[in-house]
Amino acid sequence: MSTLIIFVLLVALMLTGMPISISLGLTVLTFLYVLTDVPVEAVALKLFTGIEKFEIMAIPFFILAGNLLTHGGVAKRMIRFATSLVGHWHGGLGLGAVLACALFAAVSGSSPATVVAIGSIMLPAMLKAGYPMRFGAGVVASSGALGILIPPSIVMVMYAVSTDSSIGALFMAGVIPGLILAGMLLFTTWYRARKAGYPREPRASWRERFIAFRESIWGLLLIVVVMGGIYSGLFTPTEAAAMSAVYAFIVVVFVYKDLSLKDIPKVLLSSANMSAMLLYIITNAVLFSFLLTYENIPQAAAEWMLTAGLGVIGFLLAVNLLLLLMGNFMEPSSIILITAPILFPIAMKLGIDPIHFGIMIVVNMEIGMITPPVGLNLYVASGISKLGLTEMSVAVVPWLLTMLVFLMLITYVPEISLWLPRTLGMLS
Amino acid sequence: MPIKILDRLEEIFIALLMASATLITFIAVVHRYLASSDLPIESVQDWLVQLDLSWAQELTIILFVWMAKFGAAYGVRTGIHVGVDVLINRLGDQKRRFFILFGLFAGALFTAAIGTLGAHFVWGNGAHYAWLSWQGLDIGDVPEGPVTPDLEWPTWVVYLAIPLGSFLMCFRFLQVAWHFYGSGDLPHHDHGFVLGNTDGSNDDMHPKDMKGAK
């Protein structure tokens, strides 16, 4: 009964359009105040302890690093390098865009940032080369989703924080799925471009490729800093995030000189703005999950699920459907923070690996970002391409289907996610 | 005019918090490796070894908690807080106007409640004690309140971020509501802001304002 009240209240408040963080908090306060005799001090205490974890602080650091890189010309150099590698095949610039998104995803933890960084340069270039706008916008919006699958990833940090999983293991687990998805997106792009007869670029010589590589090396080294640092145990993920922010600052301001020192306060402020929004959702989601635990809802849901006889396969399918549906209305961080406390205990009881489960959720979130009405990537790409949201939604369909196939692969073949972290000894 | 000064202070404050947290974590990591590696100059090495930066992690957390609370208030002003606006963006102007105001007042109500709870907590966990001892009054059995583990700062000072940030946020909600009531405008956050494109928000995560409405 109380489960019903809690969720009806939450959904009703959310549908009025108030911020998700506020709906979560108000649900908790109203429920505790009206229907229970939990001392409200318990809530106050939770508010203070909600975000006092060093792991959570990786989020603002990654956002800062990402913002510095987006504003600077790191993306431009990565695009040049990517295009020199794959530009001579069918739909060369489209392939270059996918590869550049994959490279940028490896230094940035956010999908929309990847779309902005790559799309704002690549879309005009593709249009000039004679590609239809739809094709370009579709490629960029969907490959931008790689941003949260290829580490570092803010969404993975969210999952790790709300389920007490290892951020390092999750990051490693994202590498191979990320490469596979990039490969699949490349194939879809190539196939569609060949059928439509889109232009190819002149083949770059190895010398040109080397020059393009050397140009982009400073950005690419960031991958070594983050992943190498975490894997070797040199830094914790949060420290790696801070190091990458400082590194990005040095590269952008002193090496590439794309930003001057006086631009930095603006970047700091916009990063703080975005981080505070996410941290505020976390604080309130912590309150919400306290309420769920207090009402024994996760345990009840787990028992119900087990007695209903829904096996691993059925459960994972149900989770995928639920997350895809929610992905149509909310953004990834909120979805993970709200659903993880309930879904995670069930997954554990069914013997699903927490890291595999996390990667599966992240892939769902990627798809959510390119499905209407709420798809952050669609929205960002429509801002760049000036295509309407409806047209954007149609434009991404081929890649969306590719990603759905990929989701099935990830869901039912756990080894794709687990092999690398296990081989590296990061899983127990 | 005083509001403009408050706006500016708020911006400088959260940008500084962001910058200092990054610097402190960076310095702590560099220090940890320099102190444990063999440096050619012995005096530098000795100085590094005695320098204790074990509090860096705690300070980073405190800085970010403050940034989160004040940044959330700033976020109300910039319209960055995401919601589910699929439904209300499809309603007529009159109804949407009602729901937007409802949402803003709900925000003000929630932050006021949290601010009050937070203020009580801070008062009971050391602020009262600090006040009494500062005034030289009889302390009685008012608790002194705990201190943080590494820096040994009184926790109530750290937690002051909650009431201060929440009340500021409450004020921001009312300010936005007042402005919306008068002009029909809402602040909009643009996720593609690097490009400087100024198209209105159509992402269904933020409510559409009343621009162009009759």
Image (tube, helix red, strand yellow):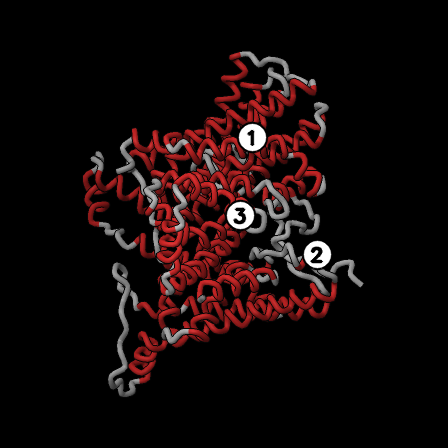
Identify residue for label 3. Answer: A267
How crowded pointer 1 is (Cα within 10 Å; few <14, some 14-19, many 20+) is rated as: some
Q: Is residue B139 left or right of residue A127?
A: left
Q: Is residue B55 above or below residue A4?
A: above
The disc labelled 2 sits on which kind of residue? Arg
The disc labelled 1 sits on which kind of residue? Thr
Camera-side residue: B1 or B97?
A: B97
Residue at figure coordinates x 64%, y 52% from the top left = B204
Tags 1 and 3 both on a single chain: yes
State if disc 3 and disc 2 touch (CB < 8 Å). Answer: no
Residue A339 position within the rendered picture, expressed as x and y whole percent measured from the top left: 45, 52
Mark-to-mark CA distance, 1 and 3: 35 Å
Residue A279 at least partly seen: yes
Mark-to-mark CA distance, 2 and 3: 34 Å
Residue at figure coordinates x 63%, y 34% from the top left = A397
Camera-side residue: A323 or B69?
A: A323
Question: Which element type, helix, strand or loop, lies under badge 2?
Answer: helix
Question: Which element type, helix, strand or loop, lies under badge 1?
Answer: helix
Q: Is residue B200 above or below residue A40?
A: above
Camera-side residue: A53 or A169?
A: A169
Residue at figure coordinates x 64%, y 54% from the top left = B86
Q: Is residue B82 above or below residue B194?
A: below
Identify residue for label 2. Answer: B90
The disc labelled 3 sits on which kind of residue? Val
Q: Is residue B42 left or right of residue B67?
A: left
Camera-side residue: B15 or A158?
A: A158
Q: Nearer the viewer, mark 2 or mark 3?
A: 2
Residue at figure coordinates x 56%, y 55% from the top left = B82
Residue A243 position within the rendered picture, expressed as x and y whole percent measured from the top left: 38, 41
Identify residue for label 1. Answer: A402
Q: Is residue A214 above or below residue A330?
A: above
Q: Which badge, 1 or 3, comes first in the chain's sequence?
A: 3
